[in-house]
């Protein structure tokens, strides 16, 4: 059911990691060790999958809160200054904040070198305490980067159950497991999927988790692990995005554009998609919003703090049942 115009959109609680990113580039080939390369541009900015989504939601003007932590150094101070809203819950932990250095390849791909920093201490007890006064009933709670939060791993399933018990709509974007899709990682992902209302994966994650060779087949393979009313959303990069729900498979295409910086593209998609869901939009419109927000973000460098005004236009789509 769509929200009435007089109703504010449901707030979104983004739970997960926040760190500092230094993104620089671009290079065609990796240099030899011991040499020096001068690059054309760089951008020092807040990063982490959860923080990226929360930043995009801020730029969309959607009510959002980031629940995370940072270190006690200058990098951490940048994060706490950015997330100081009524819904934000950012704890400062002793020690350095996590830092990631991203090197862009010409054409938009990238490689990251990262330190865990403060992230190792983010466990279920920390997040549960931070959320004690958060108005979760009726809100959307996105747990982002579950596989990148080792402290949460052991109690991740129980944590999702507690979020649901408090009346939240659950969204997950678990990311790629550090050791690959082992049997243990697959079992964990299946358990998380079974508690989620919106499962947000990219195409490589969907194929790796399912063992299939095509996105549509991956959706069918994962369907038995999903709640009856859940939506499985697969981000397909330049090919757009797909949604599998109630055995219907919907595809939305991305428009052609000049890609500068793909860092956080999937996180920006999550912001667009979930903001549309929070406003009561149907699946196709939510996919469109996600694609348009991601397209706006990856076409700019350095990243802006200005409002995102995604292009809202009709795009080709295909629908099938299976």
Image: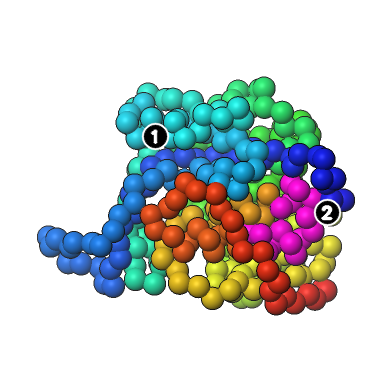
Q: Is residue 152 magenta?
A: no
Q: How is the image coloured?
A: rainbow
Q: What SS does tag 1 mark? A: helix
Residue 128, visible in the rendered structure: no
Residue 78 point in image, percent of width and height = 39, 34
Towards the viewer: 88 or 292 = 292
Residue 27, visible in the rendered structure: yes
Asked where in the image residue 221 lies, by quadrant, the reply is bottom right
Residue 20 point in image, percent of width and height = 38, 42
The part of the chain drawn in magenta is 276-290
Q: Residue at 47% across / 35% down in the picture?
A: 82
| Residue at far left of view | 34
Circle nearer the N terminus (1, 2): 1
Towards the viewer: 59 or 78 = 59
Q: Is residue 280 magenta?
A: yes
Q: Residue at 17% across / 66% down in the picture?
A: 32
* 169 sits to left or right of 59: right
Asked where in the image residue 33 lies, by quadrant, the reply is bottom left
Towards the viewer: 242 or 247 = 242
Choose mark 1 or mark 2, whichever is in front: 1
Asked where in the image residue 170 lies, by quadrant, the reply is top right
Q: Which residue is mark 2?
A: 229
Towards the viewer: 74 or 218 = 74
Q: Which residue is mark 1?
A: 78
Q: Residue at 84% across / 62% down in the picture?
A: 246
How packed mark 2 is, by other alpha carbons closer than 10 Å (few <14, some 14-19, many 20 or more), is few
For the C terminus, give its image quadrant.
bottom right
Q: Tell me the distance, in whole angstroms, between the alpha carbons under discs 1 and 2.
A: 39 Å
Residue 269 point in image, percent of width and height = 59, 57
Q: Residue at 50% across / 73% down in the picture?
A: 257
């Amino acid at each position: 059911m769509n929200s009435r115009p007089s109703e504010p959109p449901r707030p979104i609680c983004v739970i997960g990691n926040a760190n500092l990113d230094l993104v620089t580039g671009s290079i065609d080939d990796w240099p030899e060790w011991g040499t020096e390369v001068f690059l054309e541009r760089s951008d020092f900015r807040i990063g982490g999958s959860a923080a990226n989504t929360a930043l995009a939601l801020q730029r969309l003007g959607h009510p959002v809160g980031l629940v995370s932590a940072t270190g006690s150094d200058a990098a951490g101070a940048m994060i706490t200054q950015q997330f100081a809203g009524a819904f934000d819950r950012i704890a400062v932990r002793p020690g350095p904040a996590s830092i990631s250095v991203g090197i862009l390849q010409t054409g938009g791909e990238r490689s990251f070198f990262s330190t865990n920093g403060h992230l190792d201490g983010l466990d279920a007890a920390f997040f549960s305490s931070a959320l004690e006064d958060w108005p979760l009933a009726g809100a959307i709670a996105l747990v982002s980067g579950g596989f990148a939060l080792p402290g949460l791993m052991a109690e991740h399933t129980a944590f999702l159950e507690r979020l649901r018990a408090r009346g939240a709509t659950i969204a997950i974007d678990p990311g790629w497991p550090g050791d690959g899709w082992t049997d243990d990682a697959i079992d964990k992902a299946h358990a998380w999927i079974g508690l989620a209302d919106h499962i947000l994966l990219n195409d490589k994650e969907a194929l790796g988790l399912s063992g299939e060779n095509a996105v549509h087949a991956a959706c069918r393979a994962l369907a038995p692990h999903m709640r009856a009313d859940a939506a499985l959303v697969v981000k397909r990069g330049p090919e757009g995005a797909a949604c599998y729900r109630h055995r219907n498979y919907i595809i939305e295409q991305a428009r052609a554009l000049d890609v500068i910086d793909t860092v956080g593209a999937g996180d920006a998609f999550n912001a667009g998609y979930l903001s549309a869901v929070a406003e009561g939009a149907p699946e196709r419109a939510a996919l469109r919003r996600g694609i348009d927000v991601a397209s706006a973000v990856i076409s700019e460098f350095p990243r802006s703090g200005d409002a995102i005004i995604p292009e809202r236009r009709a795009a080709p789509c295909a629908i099938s049942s299976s």
